[in-house]
Amino acid sequence: MTVPVITIDGPAASGKGTIAERAANALGFHYLDSGALYRLAALASLEAGIDLSDGPAAEAVARNLKPVFRDSRIWLEGRDVTEAIRTEKVGVAASQVAAIPGVRKALFDLQRNAAQAPGLVADGRDMGTVVFPEAPLKIFMTASAAVRAERRAKQLEARGLKADREALTRDLEERDRRDRERAAAPLKPAEDAKLLDTSDMTIEEVVKKVLDWWQLAR
Ligand SMILES: Nc1ncnc2c1ncn2[C@@H]1O[C@H](COP(=O)(O)OP(=O)(O)OP(=O)(O)O)[C@@H](O)[C@H]1O
Ligand SMILES: Nc1ccn([C@@H]2O[C@H](COP(=O)(O)O)[C@@H](O)[C@H]2O)c(=O)n1
């Protein structure tokens, strides 16, 4: 049986994760946050003290990752790293290790294995182009750079963290540039992806749009 998959790709802080998780809940589907895997590889690499441009070392770290996802928390080697992987520092490091083809290969099966009945909503950068090219609904979600930086700032402030909007904008732009320009699975819409600019949409409006598209696609 083919498991139905919805893919949502797009640049940082465009809202992919929020929308993917809500759409998955509404449909009773599983949710894959593929960026969390790259963040885990980055955190483990940083903590192992390896040079993030050292391909074989970063690939070995990614191959040995044994993350546990339970009750909306993420555990690595018995440690709860849910918050530790969400910093912008780890986000930028994730975009560095994600440019290494061996790291992407090491994480491929973990992502494919997430496609379990009754269905999956997967968000990331290459869900529609590389990991689930057969998905019947592929969405490329964007928002203006200013809106994305403001959303990320509010998200950090809601967690009681300080948000330096200038630094955040710089980090998002650096990450997006690296993700778009890399040779391995660059950030780009799949040829058959639907484009959705969410700059002027509420979360509820975006979720409804995704669910409406799903009714037509499945
Ligand atoms: N349409 C929207 N309107 C307003 N806020 C939104 C909208 N979509 C998402 N947000 C908010 O923007 C913030 C960033 O969203 P989210 O973390 O889902 O983005 P992302 O694309 O998954 O980011 P990343 O690629 O860095 O993981 C969250 O606080 C979320 O609640
Ligand atoms: N499918 C993916 C998902 C993520 N990445 C890289 O990881 C970084 C962090 O991702 P977030 O979604 O958590 O922000 C991101 O900037 C990408 O470099 C990827 O390459 N492919």
Image: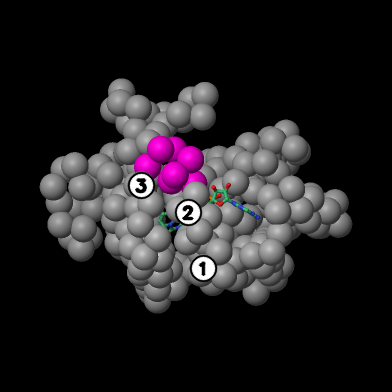
Tag 3 residue: 162
Using residue 63 as the reference point, say whether residue 110 is left or right of it.
right
- Is residue 102 shown to the viewer in this render? no
Label 1 with label 3: CB-CB less than 8 Å = no
Tag 1 residue: 146
Q: Quadrant of residue 98?
A: bottom left
Magenta residue check for 111: no
| CA–CA distance in space, label 1 to label 3 | 18 Å
Tag 2 residue: 152
Q: Does ligand 1 reach within 8 Å of label 3's beta carbon?
A: no
Q: Give the extent of the magenta segment.
A: 155-161
List x then y, in percent, for residue 126: 52, 61
Q: Residue at x 56, y 59 (%)?
A: 14
Q: Earlier in the sequence, mark 2 or mark 1?
A: 1
Q: Secondary structure at mark 3?
A: loop
Q: Name the kind of residue labelled 1 in the image.
A: Ala
Using residue 191 as the reference point, say whether residue 169 is left or right of it.
left
Q: Residue at x 76, y 53 (%)?
A: 205
Label 2 with label 1: CB-CB less than 8 Å = no
| CA–CA distance in space, label 2 to label 3 | 11 Å
Q: Nearer the viewer, residue 148 or 63?
A: 148
